[in-house]
Structures are given as structure tokens and as C-alpha cells.
Amino acid sequence: MGDVQQASGGGQASSGHGEFSVLVIEDNPGDRRLAELALTAGAEGTGAFCEVLLAGTLEEGLQLLATAERNAMHAILLDLGLPDAAGFDGLQRLKSLYPDIPVIILTGQNEEAVAISALKFGAADYLEKDEIRPRSLWRSIGYALERKKLEAELVYLAATDPLTMVKNRRALLEALPLIMENALRSELHCAVLIIDIDNFKQINDLLGHSTGDELLLTVASRISDAIRQTDVVGRLGGDEFAVIATNLKSPEGAIEIAEKITQAIAAVPEINGRPIEISSSVGIALFPSGVENSDELLTHADLAMYKAKKEGRASICLYDESLHHELRRRLLLKRAMVSDMATPGFYLDYQPIVDCKTHEIVSAEGLARWRTRDGKIVMPAEFIPIAEENGWIADLGMRMIEQACEFMSRSLSTGVPVVPISINVSPIQCKDKGFPGEFTRAIERRGLSPTLFNIEITESTFMQDIDGARRGLEALMHVGIGIHIDDFGTGYSSLSLLRDLPLKHLKLDRSFVSRLAEDLGTRPIMEAIIDLARKLEFKTVAEGVETAEQVKLLTEIGIDYLQGYYFSRPISAAKLCEELVMGGVVRNGYGLGLEAGHDMDNADKISRALGR
């Protein structure tokens, strides 16, 4: 052990360019001393201070590294001909134990081929011993350190989201299995929290992408401040973030972290100088919890997040067995849809819309339904999202349009009275440039008037692509198809949309109608909307009408049309035909239906209209 030495050279240079520690592992005392002097002189020449540690064997060098402070060693000079580590053995052992410290190989003459091979084993550079000069040695160390710095930066960038500078999806996916293993060993819990900013798409579209980016930066910072040092935060993509919470003593710990995150995000007062109110939805999946791998844990957290969004803004949902059953049901529905898409299992029911004063049926809304092969009825709230997620919505939507056109054509040809039919259209269909042409051709093939059809779209459809929506809607409006905004008042209700888009009707969301009798503030809001619509020459429809009192109040404030269970639930095409044949006036709030004893001529017309 007498060969183990420590030497420092020259003191701190006045320019203060830094302090370095270099370990020289060389069994030849002369070469070892030469390297020490060259390092000291080279450091002084650049205004730096270099601490040189000397060892005559690999084991002596490893002892010095073991006792040095963590990350204190900047570089290692290694002789390949050590008595206890011949060839590349010493290099491989150093790289396995200290992979972040660059190793520069010292070689004798005629060993260049060996030195080049050493580079393949992880060496940063090599120098021939007779070329050890202060300048060349220090330059080699400098290059090695620069490469190490660059490699570290590349590793950081590969694991970092470029906008928010938190970990990216790939880094999170790589970290999660290790954290799960540690939870099992330590007999503690870990959890995945997926955080989604509520209504981010609308904020991004209304305030601009630069404001949206600034919001993402702010949210990433707020989440980072809200979690503990041992937790990991990253961005999955878009407006979704994830936190891997570690070392949890109980499931309640994950909920507490989620609450801190939602509170921190909600406390953001403004973005780019604009006041803003934001909230977030959080889904949590715990481990251990019966999952077999990290992908399954992420899937559970994602499902919990979507459940939280359904429950409303600023919700937190913990994955449990009921969500597992929901996931399984969605998978079964998806498989059933694949086989049922081309069958008559998908059909339209119709809900009448009546004149507010006369209660005469003036139109009907076509509502998609799905009767599965075992006879069960599935509502659109369940199967429409599945169709949208899997790219089936355009085909399904056109099938419903074709069905409505066929029903209208048969009714007219058999003398059954008809009213315009409104059809709900997905935002995905609206963004399809070919949709207006497909709809128009379906009408033309049957010789129908486009004025017999309306489409209903939500405000969010406009917010996703205002210019694209405008072009598509103008094409439909140009041929006479009516455009109705559905659920008006639940989104941003931008007045510029009412000014710029070719609209015909506004359908006030049912939440206004349900609060009309009890909430004093609702009536003046509805009156203002109705007055504005009248001045813009739009008609107004109130949906969700269920009581006589609501009918009375809506009539008083001047609504044009009414729709809801008070007049009729969604009914079959046959029931709609029957009511229109009987005069199409709903006189009482008991729903639609034919009185007994209607004449056989009308019954025959109805049968032929339905293709029987």
C-alpha cells in the first residue's frame, strides 16, 4: 500500500476556472510521477486547480475511489498493463462500478491497436506514455469531460419533455417498473396519478396556443411544487400529466397528494396577464393491487381519470373493482360493435319537438340506438365514445343519416305527413371534408328536399376547428340543411360564433330548464338568450321539458319550441308516423300514442312508410 500517494499542484489559480480531481492508476513510478507533474502544470496553465491521486494497482485505485466523496472524481488515467488487471479487465471493472467517470488509457509504444479497442469497451480517450505533456494531457481530459457533459445532456433531453422540462412519457414508463419492485421489497405502496386539465382544448383555442403552452408550463411547475422529493412527475402528452407517488404507507397518501395537486392547479390566478379559472381531474391507481405489470397499472389510472372527468370538474377518482367491470363492459361492447355495425341493430328513435303555443309537432330529433343480438338496448352515451375512439363514427353516422332519409322517402311516397328530422353529428364527422357531400348525395338519391333535414352539433365542435367547421356548415346550409347548436350555454357560448356561423336554431341546455322554476337568476339569462336569438333571426328550443310549470314559464319568456318527456319520450318511427297521421298535436303531458280505433287506411299508410 506504500505506492498509494496523494499530490496537489500549485494551489488555486487566480483566474479560478475550477477544481478537478484526477486518479492516476499506473504501476511504473516514473510514468506515474510524470503524469502527476503534467496534470499539475496543465491545470495551472488554464487557471485551474487539480488534485491528483496516485495508485500503483487497480485495487489501490478502487480503494481511493471508494473513500472519495461522491461525484468528486472527474477523470481516471489507467495503464492497461497493471499487475492485478491485465488487458481490459481493469477498464471493464472501473466502468461497471463508476460508469460516469471518464477513463483515459495510458499506453506504451506500438499499442495503438489495443488502445483503439479499449475505446469500444468504454474508454473516453487514449495517450501514448511518451506523449504525456501538460498541454496534451489536459486537453485529453478536457475533451473527455466535455463528452461526458454532452452525453449527460443527451440523456437528460431524451428523458425530458421539451416544453415543460419534466420527465417525458418514455422516462415515466421506464421508471415505473423499478418503483413497483421497490414497493414490493419495502412493503409500502406506490401509485400512479394521471392529471388532466379540464377544458384545456377550449382554453387553447380561445386564448391561443402560446397561452396554452404557458398554461402547461405553469401546471407542470405547480404539480412539481405540490409533490414530495421522492415522487416523479412527467407529461404523458397534450394536457395530461402523471405523477408516480412512492413510499406510501397507505392509499390515503395518494389521495392527499392528488388533493394538493388539484388545489395547486386551481390556485393559478392568470396566464399571460389574463385572469383564468382552471381545474383538473385526477385518476389514481394503487400498487400493490393485483395488477401484473406497469402497463396495466397505467391503464387503471387512465380509466380512473376518465371516470373523474365524467363526474365533473375538479374530481378525483380512485380505481376500484367497479371500474374494472366498466372496462370489461366497454371491451365487450367494442367487440359486439364490430359484428353489429353492418346489421339493422343500429337504428333511430325520434323525439318530437313541438310548437310552444300550439303544441303541434314541428320536427323530431333522431336519436341513435343499438339493439344488441341478445335484445338489449344500448344508449348512445355508451357506444358513441367507443365508435369515436375506434374510427367508426363516420360510418355509423352516415348509416343513421341514410336510415333517416329512407324513412322520410317512404313516408312521403305513401302519404304519411312528415316533419323535418334533426340528426346529431359528431365533431369528428364535422371535421371530415367529405361529410357535406355524402349527406347531400344521400338526400339527392331519394329525391328529397334538403330543407327536411337539420343537423345538431355542440358548441365544442366549433371550438375544435372554427374555420373548418364554418366551411363544412356553409356547404350544408347552402343546399338548405338547417344547422342547430345543441346544449347551448354549457360551453363558452361565444357571441362571435352566433355572428359568424350559418346557424338556424339554438337549443338551450336542459340545465337551464331544470333550474328555471327554482333559480331566480336563470330566467333573466334565458330571456337574454331568447332576445338575442330573435334579433339574429334564430329560433330557440328548450330541451328537457318535464313539467307543466316549466311549459308555462317557457311560454311566458317567449321560447319558440319545446322538447322533453312532458310531451314525449323518444319513440319509434312507427309511433311518430301514428301521431303525425292523427294530427301531430300533443294536448296533454302524457306522452304520444294513438288512441284506440284509428282507421285502417291510416294504419296501411304507416305500414308502407315503414317498409313493411
Image (cartoon, rainbow, N blue to C red):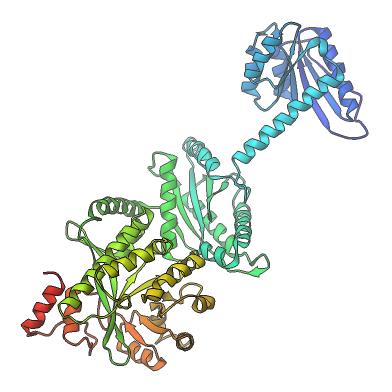
- Above or below residue 165? Residue 520 is below
The answer to whether residue 97 is left or right of residue 192 is: right
- Above or below residue 127? Residue 167 is below
Q: Residue at x 55, y 60 (%)?
A: 262
Q: Quadrant of residue 308?
A: bottom left
Q: Residue at x 71, y 29 (%)?
A: 147
Q: Quadrant of residue 53?
A: top right
- Above or below residue 505? Residue 47 is above
Quadrant the N terminus occupies: top right
| Residue situated furthest right in the rendering | 14
User: x and y percent of residue 55 in the render?
Assistant: 76, 14
- Nearest the viewer among 327 and 358 is 358
User: x and y percent of residue 427 in the render?
Assistant: 41, 64
Residue 300 visible at all: yes
- Nearest the viewer among 296 and 467 is 467
Instruction: Count up the numbered dots.
Output: 0
Quadrant the C terminus occupies: bottom left
Q: Residue at x 54, y 54 (%)?
A: 257
User: x and y percent of residue 421 in the render?
Assistant: 29, 76
Q: Quadrant of residue 129?
A: top right
- Above or below residue 146? Residue 564 is below
Residue 121 visible at all: no
User: x and y percent of residue 220 in the render?
Assistant: 60, 54
- Nearest the viewer among 530 and 153 is 530
